[in-house]
Image: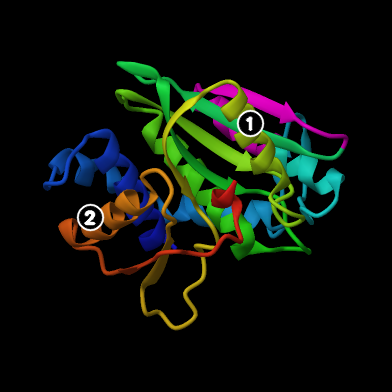
């Protein structure tokens, strides 16, 4: 799990630093990725460990109904708030709500890179799908929020992916309506399980905007930083996750 999260974080850092050559600063920051933190986030979101939310100790037993989703949403909000980010609680229906945070860029605050996952699930537990993706985004927020970047970063947690990409579609519609200048999106999906330890990472792109360029760039930095992973770019990739929104 740490390898996949590390690759994604390196991708983000490389883009923000506009660097296609080795950068020791990027390596230094990537080393801050903490496996214990990643595992802890997954265990909490999949109901293995209890957590204090507000003044109550709770167990997030599932992320299927609105009750379980609300607990997960509040947990994510508290984590992001602790990192000093702008928090947005986007209710779009009686049962659906997106949670996202913005880290403002220093030079281009109105231009955004999005790092996201969906926090709902199709049944109980669902550690891989997609508590693992959420863990990667939370860990990215923990690390990246300590630094400054030229562009703004959105840390997004979408609801109701499992019933038709509902939450991310709403966010995308609002972003389009408000003419948000989105430079790139990395959706983190099912990143916590490598059944045969082959290190394969699937990168799904489409011939839209700079998707293919970013996918190939992500593959190249795997070599640049000597990661023991094997990224494979698919074009056209699957449309069965929130990146399709």
Secondary structure under tag 2 reads helix
In this view, the mark in front (1 or 2): 2
Spot occupied by residue 2 in the image (x, y as percentages of width and height): 40, 59
Nearer-the-camera pick, 126 or 117 = 117
Magenta-drawn segment: 74-94
Coordinates of residue 32 in the picture (x, y in percent): 32, 45
Q: Is residue 148 above or below residue 194?
A: above
Identify the image quadrant of residue 131: bottom right
Q: Is residue 156 left or right of residue 55?
A: left
Mark 2 surroundings within 10 Å by alpha-carbon count, few (fewer than 14), some (14 through 19), many (20 or more): many
Residue depicted at x 77% and y 55%: 163
Q: Which mark is residue 195?
A: none
Determine which quarter of the picture holds residue 35: bottom left
The x, y position of residue 30, in whole percent, is: 29, 46
C-alpha separation, residue under disc 1 versus residue under disc 2: 32 Å
Q: Which residue is mark 2?
A: 221
Q: Residue furthest front?
A: 207
Residue 78, disc: 1
Q: Residues within 10 Å of mark 1 (few under 14, many from 20)?
A: some
Position of the N terminus, as image quadrant, is bottom left
Q: What residue lies at 64% left-to-right and 24% top-to-bottom?
A: 88
Q: Secondary structure at mark 1?
A: helix
């Amino acid at each position: 799990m740490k390898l996949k999260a590390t690759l994604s974080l390196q991708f983000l850092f490389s883009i923000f630093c506009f660097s296609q050559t080795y950068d020791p600063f990027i390596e230094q920051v990537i080393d801050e990725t903490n496996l214990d933190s990643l595992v802890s986030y997954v265990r909490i979101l999949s109901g293995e460990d209890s957590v204090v939310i507000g003044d109550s100790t709770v167990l997030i037993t599932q992320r299927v109904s609105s009750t379980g989703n609300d607990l997960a949403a509040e947990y994510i909000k508290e984590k992001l708030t602790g990192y000093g980010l702008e928090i947005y609680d986007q209710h779009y229906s009686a049962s659906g709500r997106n949670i996202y945070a913005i880290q403002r860029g220093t030079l281009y605050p109105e231009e955004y890179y999005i790092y996201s996952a969906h926090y709902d699930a199709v049944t109980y537990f669902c550690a891989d799908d997609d508590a693992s993706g959420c863990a990667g985004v939370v860990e990215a927020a923990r690390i990246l929020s300590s630094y400054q970047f030229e562009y703004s970063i959105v840390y997004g947690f979408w609801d109701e992916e499992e019933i038709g990409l509902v939450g991310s579609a709403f966010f995308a519609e609002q972003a389009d309506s408000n003419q948000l200048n989105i430079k790139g999106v990395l959706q983190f999906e099912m990143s916590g399980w490598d059944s045969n330890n082959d290190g394969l990472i699937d990168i799904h792109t489409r011939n839209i905007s700079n998707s293919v360029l970013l996918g190939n760039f992500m593959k190249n930095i795997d070599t640049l930083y000597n990661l023991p992973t094997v990224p494979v770019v698919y074009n056209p990739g699957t449309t069965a996750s929130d990146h399709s929104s």
